[in-house]
Image (cartoon, coloured by chain):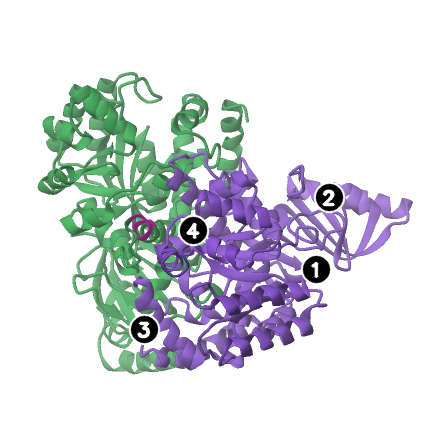
Chain colours: A purple, B green
Amino acid sequence: MRAKFVAAVLALWAIAAAQAPRRAVSLIVIGGTVITENAARQVLSPGALAIDGTDIVAIDTPNAIIRGFSAAETIDELGNVVLPGLVNTHTHAPMVMYRGLADDLALMDWLQKYIFPAEAKTVSPEMVRIGTRLAALEMIESGTTTYADMYYFEEEIAKTTRDAGLRGVLGQTIIQFPVADAKTPAEGLKRAESFIKSFRNDSLIVPAVAPHALYTNDAATLVACAALGRKYGVPVIIHLAETEDEVKIAREQHQATPVGYLESLGFWGPRTLAAHGVWVNDDDIQILKKHGVGVSHNPESNMKLASGTAPVTKYLAAGIALGLGTDGAASNNDLDMFGAMRQASFLAKHATHDPTAVPARTALDMATIGGARALGMEKLIGSLEVGKRADLITVSMGAARQTPMYDPISHLVYVTHGDDVRSTIVNGKVLMKNRELRTLDREAVIDAATRLSQKVRAAVGR
Amino acid sequence: MRAKFVAAVLALWAIAAAQAPRRAVSLIVIGGTVITENAARQVLSPGALAIDGTDIVAIDTPNAIIRGFSAAETIDELGNVVLPGLVNTHTHAPMVMYRGLADDLALMDWLQKYIFPAEAKTVSPEMVRIGTRLAALEMIESGTTTYADMYYFEEEIAKTTRDAGLRGVLGQTIIQFPVADAKTPAEGLKRAESFIKSFRNDSLIVPAVAPHALYTNDAATLVACAALGRKYGVPVIIHLAETEDEVKIAREQHQATPVGYLESLGFWGPRTLAAHGVWVNDDDIQILKKHGVGVSHNPESNMKLASGTAPVTKYLAAGIALGLGTDGAASNNDLDMFGAMRQASFLAKHATHDPTAVPARTALDMATIGGARALGMEKLIGSLEVGKRADLITVSMGAARQTPMYDPISHLVYVTHGDDVRSTIVNGKVLMKNRELRTLDREAVIDAATRLSQKVRAAVGR
């Protein structure tokens, strides 16, 4: 069947080549099914895209694309599914170095006995580079094309991300206590401003400022972060209402909910991205909606850390820009957005006692165009449309666990893993083709991380 | 590092070969880490096993095994983890044919519009063979070595399972209404008895009787099923307290909980296996404990169908024999026990608001020795011990998402998929080695299922 189709396409290709001048482009991608995630949620079976430079220039049937365009490179995955690259709206990339270092602990034990000591002894520009490279490898291999980050030495993360060819919304962390890259929040803010200036015109990197949380920054710092974001028109990323304890702190210290307290500071704006948003009430959701705040839902982290359940169906009903995130690999423990989709659907059904909640289509929307909206980037990425950046992935559907296939969207969410991704393209550039990496040396990345892990192990006495 | 070790092992092997007579066995398996799941939960790093015929005859360091034994075949996976084969305590193997046929629906819509019509039009001995072969492929590829089943034409499932080389506790379904293989429950019981007689001395198949549920069978049928199980000393498998509706039915029709009603019928015994056990109270748990009933926890199915949360920590505290199951692929949608482990841990943490609930070790116990106990087979399988059947798998740990590795048990539960399984051995026979299948023709199995799926699609008008 497939061989016949390819033969027919090649025959048409030869005829077309003889008959009409074709537009020269950099890349053609052909898929058995192309899931566009455009406004009409159009699906082409089969379908193809023409890409020139960084942009998608045409989406049509394979025949039409082959008749109309000649490409320097063609990715023919007629047996596979093509979809927008996945958007991970919340992680801490270098924390892959602490993956599985300590699990199944109460939050304070986990932080105080393992994560904080490990960070105090091992966070450095080199650790951040090695960790980000490993995270980039995992993201490219599992189909994430854009990710939002909060960590330290964010300029190193930015350089590493750009070298790997991924798109990143990267937030320099601001926190009240001394950390590896800043002794004070003022120093952190200075570092953030310099980071923003260096990267604000980058084609892959969106620099951002990332006040860690309301309970780790005082009011003046939070206000300064929001002001810095506004001054440069860049995103402001914050952990919000992740745990019930955070609500308790806000109520005791500020006589308000976390959302209400930040509202009283004038913190919110259309470029703020709130990670988690678990413990919010209906008024809080209205405040977030009023300001056009993006929310990142992290179902796996929330379950593993027993944080609670974000009111996803309420966010969706309110029209909040809702994306999905994995959170850092220290609390998930992977960066696989397919797992995040599956868990978003499962957790919503479980929490609302309604098996129709967050159907596969909605989970896929959250991981693509929803994430793009949450990051304020829906005009550039999140769907396959002419004029948008060419951020896309191809996914195989031939595994036993994917057989038979009645509905590709069900399969993407319920039985597909990151390992099924075949090719990953960001900004028109092929980062992985048929599992062959083009921007990273797989063995070298894994070896460097494995060597560094000895230092991490020593730091926490494991 | 690995190359050096292998060289050293080979050198020792040569020395040993020259010095001492070694016992001839059928198979040696060498692993970087051997997780035994024995009573002491011993872990050997590195470790090796000698297997002769169906049994494990020695577990020791690779050097000791190589000095003591010569094998017809050696599986050298020194970079990988070796562990007991996973035990899936609840599925409906042929329902892989309905995988992803209909998702995200209310239970009654799902059953009445899709599953029942599809079953009425497509269940046949041939469908059961094709579906079971696909399920067996998926299970072998994802590290399940024993599974418990409930479906129709169970003798066909048994033959197909035996041909694939898997171990199965296979229950012939008994149900009050007419189904494909029996017009009445009496006919079903006759079929079950004949099935039991045919397979009760099989080395891989444990035949069982499977009354579907208390709400789909009258009291006389339930009593007859229990009696049939006792007569032949075989397991009796039933869906128990899966939904809140089932509790309502039991209370209205029998003025008792589901567990209490079945207790009043004298249904329970040490060979009964109850699937789901979501809606049980403390008295129910005591009844199950008193009779030594095994319970199968199916966290993914329970979440996807919004059935509720089984009280896993209470079952564990009570010492109930608790295993994990995937449920059928129509409601999960895969048969991957690694996913079941991860979800068992995540859901327990979430439901109890306690991140220390069901740590990785406990989830692994449930998927191995716990499942064996739930099936009453803990003397044969579920751990790697001398004298037990050689049911084991090897798992790679080299993926980016598995880097670095601080703790193999954390990685098995939190970042590993079925696709990471390299070799699968059941009853001493190698079913898959380095992803190469020995008992099934992968392409043929997938092609047959894909062809049959056209008929399923037509049956429900999709």
Q: CA distance from mark 4 to mark 3?
A: 25 Å
- Residue at 28%, 71% (x, y): give it: B47
Tags 4 and 2 both on a single chain: yes
State the residue position of label 4.
A278
Tags 1 and 3 both on a single chain: yes
Q: Is residue A226 magenta?
A: no
Q: Report the magenta residues as a range.
A: B347-351
A120 displayed left or right of A64: left
Please determine whether, in this image, residue A354 is positioned above or below residue B340: above
State the residue position of label 1.
A427
Chain to which mark 4 belongs? A
Q: Which mark is residue A108?
A: none
Q: CA distance from mark 1 to mark 3?
A: 41 Å
Q: CA distance from mark 3 to mark 2?
A: 61 Å
Q: Amino acid at mark 3?
A: Lys
Relative depth, front residue between A93 and A195:
A195
State the residue position of label 2.
A7
Please determine whether, in this image, residue A162 is positioned above or below residue B224: below
Instruction: Tell me, yes or no, if residue A137 can be seen here.
Output: no
Q: Are there few (<14), some (14-19), or many (20+) residues within 10 Å of tag 2?
A: few
Tags 4 and 1 both on a single chain: yes
Marks 1 & 3, CB-CB < 8 Å contact:
no
Q: CA distance from mark 2 to mark 1?
A: 30 Å
Relative depth, front residue between B73 and B140:
B140
Q: Amino acid at mark 1?
A: Asn
Which badge, 4 or 2, is on the more N-terminal residue? 2
Q: Are there few (<14), some (14-19), or many (20+) residues within 10 Å of tag 4?
A: many
Magenta-colored segment: predominant secondary structure: helix
Q: Amino acid at mark 2?
A: Ala
Instruction: Tell me, yes or no, if residue A116 can be seen here.
Output: yes
Chain to which mark 3 belongs? A
Q: Mark 1 or 3, which is nearer the eye? A: 3
